[in-house]
């Protein structure tokens, strides 16, 4: 799977930048099928969360060089037992995203870039976007 949320138009499911889509797919094939490409070819993919009091640490595969496109993110949300999601303050600590939300005392669930037209703002060192996810 390659993600194209960063190069697609939010109102059209078919990205106009076909060349970049082709490059991403070719790099993935060279790595996964032919084993001749050692570059990072996947965007960050959700791995797990660890909850400690009111803080959530989100881990990803392919997380080398994580960064937010706009220095901070408003795309992470957390929910408690009631299932109501609130935006969380997000920061990057090494290859993890740390979340805090004053409205949720005991977070249990996390979601990222959860919406029909949201373009991911979390990238890795290969400038590839993270996939949206929900931890339910």
Image (tube, rainbow, N blue to C red):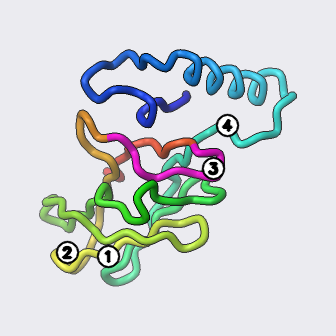
Residue under circle 2?
104
Q: Callout 1: helix, strand or loop?
A: strand
User: Residue, x 29% and y 40% (percent of image)?
Assistant: 118
Q: Position of residue 28 (x, y in %)?
A: 68, 27
| Nearer the camera: disc 1 or disc 4 | 4
Is disc 4 placed on a helix, strand or loop? loop
- The x and y percentages for residue 117 are 25, 35
Measuring 35% from the left and 40% from the top, which residue is drawn there? 119
The residue carrying pointer 2 sits among few (fewer than 14), some (14 to 19) or many (20 or more) residues within 10 Å by Cα, namely many
Q: Mark 3–mark 2 contact, CB under 8 Å?
A: no
State the residue at coordinates (25%, 75%): 101
Classify mark 1: residues with Cα within 10 Å, few (<14), some (14-19) or many (20+).
many
Seen in the picture, residue 88 relative to 75 is either above or below; the reply is: below
Mark 1 or mark 3, which has the lower sequence index?
3
Which residue in the structure is indicated by mark 1? Answer: 100
Local crowd size for mark 3, using a 10 Å CA cut-off: few (<14), some (14–19), many (≥20): many
Name the residue furthest right.
36
Numbered disc 3: secondary structure: loop
Q: Which circle marks residue 41 in the picture?
A: 4
Of the image marks 1 and 4, the number of the one nearer the N terminus: 4
């Amino acid at each position: 799977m390659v993600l194209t949320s960063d190069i697609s138009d939010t109102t059209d499911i078919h990205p106009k930048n076909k060349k970049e889509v082709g490059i991403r797919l070719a790099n993935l094939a060279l790595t996964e099928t032919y084993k001749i490409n050692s570059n990072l070819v996947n965007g960050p993919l959700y791995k797990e969360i660890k909850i400690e009091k009111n803080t959530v640490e989100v881990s990803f595969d392919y997380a080398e060089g994580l960064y937010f496109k706009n220095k901070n993110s408003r795309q992470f949300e957390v929910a408690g037992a009631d299932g109501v999601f609130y935006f969380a303050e997000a920061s990057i600590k090494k290859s993890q995203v740390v979340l805090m939300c004053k409205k949720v005392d005991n977070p249990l669930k996390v979601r990222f870039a959860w919406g029909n037209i949201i373009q991911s703002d979390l990238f890795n060192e290969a400038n590839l976007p993270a996939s949206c996810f929900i931890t339910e």
